[in-house]
Amino acid sequence: MMPGRKSSVELNTTGSKDSALSTPRHDLPVSSATQLLANSSGVQNIQEYHERLVRRVNELENEVRIMKSAHNAVLPICRLPAEILSSIFILVYPGFHANRSLPYCFVLSHVCWHWKTVALGCSAIWADLDHTVRPTLAGLMLRRSRNAPLTIQYWFPDRRHERLIRTILSQTPRLHQIRIVDSFDGAFDLVEAFSEFGGYAPSLHTLHIQRDTKMRKDEFPDIFLAGGAPFLRILELCNCNIPWGRMPFSSCLTVLRLRDEPSNSRNRPSPNGFLGVLRSLTSLKQLELRGYLPEDESQPLQAPVTLPVLETFLLQDSIHAIRCFLRSVQVPHTANPMLYITDHLDDVLTVGLLFSDFKSALKSFDLNSRAQPVSPVVRQLQFDTDIHDFGNGIMKFMTMDVWLETGYAPPPKPVKFVGNFLPLADVFLTVREQFDLSRLQELGIEDFSELQVTDWTNSFGDLARLHTVKVGTESEVRNLLGAMNKTIPRGSLLAPRSSHYFPALTYIELHGMDFNRGEPRANIIACIIDNLKQRSKTQPVRQLLVNRCRNFKHHHHELLDNAEIPGLTLLWDRYEDSDSDSELEEEYAEGSDHDWHTP
């Protein structure tokens, strides 16, 4: 560069402020303001240049937002009136909320300006609070919900939720649905949360509170919904330690489930107080009472209460309390009952009285809800065992499921009776005395080993329609097979129709049986083969189903299949289908052909 001659950049810097950018290197398809800034050649003050660029970028971004808003404003969804768009938000809301980490109401409010305005004005979509929402966001939702009916659902809340839940529950007139399952470790003070839960609740539809058994001694405040909830439809309280007289009953109830410690007599109702409440529940469809049946016999019972639309009812209490209930009500014969007897049964006579009371409670209702007697017959019968804890620790109880027919289609679920163990043969005879078994078609007996051949023949051998029997132990199999090959004595009512017991038996199912218990496996397989072959000479069994049987191997299936029993189809679910050489050697060591025998 020659001395005394200035460069083009130096000359530009002495001119106007924007002269350094006045000559772009090439044209761009942008506005003149952007074109002026796009050429950075000859810039000396970099900081000032960056600031001007940032301002221009902000201007352009603002223009883009304005143009996008204008574009959105002419879309059909944004031209809907706010009332219609709000209705759409409310209708779509339940399906979306469960699938997003961020509450659906916040998602709606961040789509566009119009949607945000409508969402903020739609208080209903902010009124659904649950445990998945952070307390800070839940507080914001509560404020934005304004006066909309509130729905809260909290599973296992902790200390973070206490103040929020207490604030929500204090707004009793707004509450619509309450579902709270208390924590098991006492990390949340549920009683304190309900300390202001009083007054009048005209909008309350559902009240569900579930507590752990170790917390059930805590008492809720006396003001607990003291103002009433006249339109309450679902009331479910578990281990809440609330007396019957303080329950917020409503004539609109369709679901009533109450559970308490059976020994807590303080919360039980009087007989007349109990029936007075039931008499007002004409819309009741589901009833569950555990520890809430009356036990006081000093008051005379009133006329039976009619529950014409009851669909299911579960009772868990002493047999005396359950019998009192059954003698005091009339329920549809189509209802699905479950009766859990918590006290010890000494004889089957009491069980027979229970069956009799149960039959008397079943009625058929005409269009005017007038009760008519019914004569139920048993279509299917199942005896099994199950594990329960009725307050005295975990114990094994006997269960009996009965499928009844009353002249209509049989119900899809059985009547369930649960109680302690009694001699099964005596229970059978009691069932025969109390129920009509003439149309019994299916019988299941699992996990019992006490029935002898004579018990099978005396209890069920003469049933002309019994075509399916399911058994679950080795002794049950042996004695059933022995019973079905017994010859009927001359002079029996069944003798003209058949020479053997179980005349209609065509299907046998081995269910859950352990082939490693009892005698060697080869012996029980031989017993099955010999008895089925013997039966095939008179009235063959058509199907043998091996279902979920332990230690039944492929080798056993081959033995049964190769026996070529006339008319028999063998079905196996291949549960525990694993053979090995050592297992086969063990099989032949346990027994051989000359060990096979018939009982």
Image: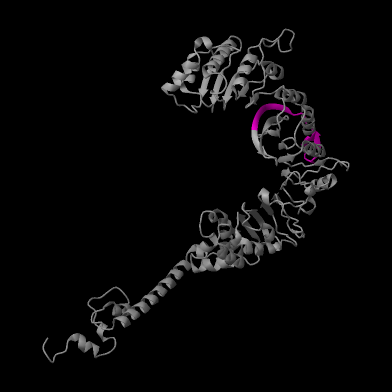
Name the residue: 36% across, 75% down.
57
Question: In the shown orientation, is residue 100 left or right of residue 49?
Answer: right
| Residue 391 visible in the shown view | yes
Which residue is more in the foreground, 310 or 45? Answer: 45
Magenta-colored stretch includes residue 524: no
Instruction: Give x and y (percent) for residue 174.
Output: 68, 62
Rendered position, 362 above or below 556: below
Question: In the shown orientation, is residue 72 left or right of residue 386?
Answer: left
Instruction: Give x and y (percent) for residue 210.
Output: 66, 51
| Residue 409 visible in the shown view | no
Rendered position, 145 above or below 392: below
| Residue range highlighted in magenta | 360-385
Name the residue: 61% across, 10% down.
538
Which residue is more in the foreground, 70 or 508? Answer: 508
Name the residue: 66% across, 63% down.
166
Locate the C terminus by quadrant: top right
Rendered position, 77 above or below 42: above
Instruction: Give x and y (percent) for residue 155.
Output: 60, 53
Residue situated furthest left in the rendering: 2
Magenta-colored stretch includes residue 362: yes
Instruction: Give x and y (percent) for residue 218.
Output: 71, 54
